[in-house]
Image: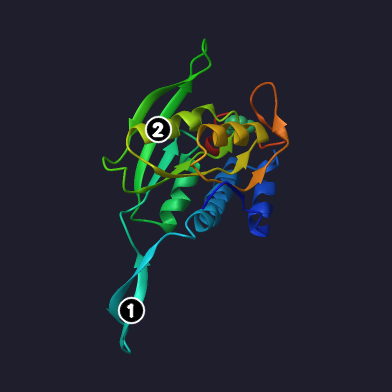
Amino acid sequence: MQGVTVVDHPLIQHKLTLMRDKNTSTASFRRLLFEISHLLCYETTRDLETEEVEIETPIQPMMAPKLSGKKLVFASVLRAGDGLLEGMLDLVPAARVAHIGLYRDPETLQPVEYYFKAPEDLSDRLVIVLDPMLATSNSVSAAVTKLKERGAHNIRFVCLLAAPEGVERFTKNHPDVPVVTAAIDERLNDHGYIVPGLGDAGDRMFGTK
Ligand code: URA
C-alpha cells in the first residue's frame, strides 16, 4: 500500500453523510464511526501477508491461509482516535494497542506529548495509526515521528476525513506512510476545522459540547 487512498465505497459515503449532519445525535455519530471503522480496517489490511498452514476440516486435511508475522498494532491518537479503535479491534482482535496523547502548546502552537504507551517491539510490526480528522496534520505527524523514534518503520495512517492542506503536510513529513481516508474535503478554515467537515469529532463522539 502506498500514497493516499480515498475509500469511496457507497456504504462509507452514506454513513459519512449521516455523520456530517449536525442533527445526528451523539449515539448515532459514535455508532456510525464504529461501523465505518470496520470498512476502513478492511481496506487498510487488504494486502496483509498470509502463510499456508495445515489444518483439518471435518472432511479432510488442507493447507489454508492465516495471517503471518507479528501481531499488528493500532495506535490511537487521543482522544478521537479511540472512536476508530473499537471497530478495528472487532476485525483484528489479537492486535496490540498503543495510545498517544498530545496537546497544542498555546504559545508555540506545537504539539506536546502528555501520554505515550505502546508495545515494546514496534520494529517488526505493522503499526496502524488512528485519528479521524487529518486537519493541520501537526498532532498525527508528531505521533508518527514518536512511533518512528520508538522503532516503528512499517506504518499506515487511517482517518475518516482529511483536508487537502493536512494531506500535503503529512505526506511531506512522512512520505513513507500510506494514508487511508473516507474523503478529502475542500479546505481548512482559520480555526483549523475541516470545511465542510463534521465539526469537532471528539466532541461529537463523546457529547462534550
Ligand atoms: N479536528 C476535528 O475534530 N475537526 C476538525 O474539523 C479538525 C480537527
Q: Is residue 209 above or below residue 44?
A: above
Task: Point out residue 16 in the picture as x, y percentages from the top left corner.
Answer: 65, 48
Q: Looking at the picture, tell me which residue is in the foreground, 70 or 85.
A: 70
Instruction: Decide if residue 200 is in sight here.
Output: no
Q: From the top left corner, tell me how far across and down residue 206 is, in percent.
A: 52, 36
Q: Quadrant of residue 49?
A: bottom left
In this picture, is 125 found above or below 170? below
Answer left or right for 44 relative to 161. Answer: left
- Give the side of residue 114 with respect to residue 41, left or right: left
- Under circle 2, the secondary element is strand
Residue lying at 67% horizontally and 52% vertically, measured from the top left: 13
For the point 64% across and 25% down, the residue is 192
Whole-percent x and y of residue 146?
39, 31
Image spot of residue 44 (x, y percent):
50, 54
Please tell me the numbered disc located at residue 100.
2
Q: The disc labelled 1 sits on which kind of residue? A: Met
Give ligand 1's quarter of the image.
top right
Residue at the far top: name it: 107
Q: CA distance from mark 1 to mark 2?
A: 40 Å
Q: Secondary structure at mark 1?
A: strand
Figure colour scheme: rainbow
**Residue 63 numbered mark, or none:** 1
Q: 191 or 61, which lies in front? A: 61
Q: Residues within 10 Å of mark 2 (few under 14, many from 20)?
A: many
Q: Where is 93 relative to 18, above or below?
A: below
- Residue 18 falls left or right of residue 50: right
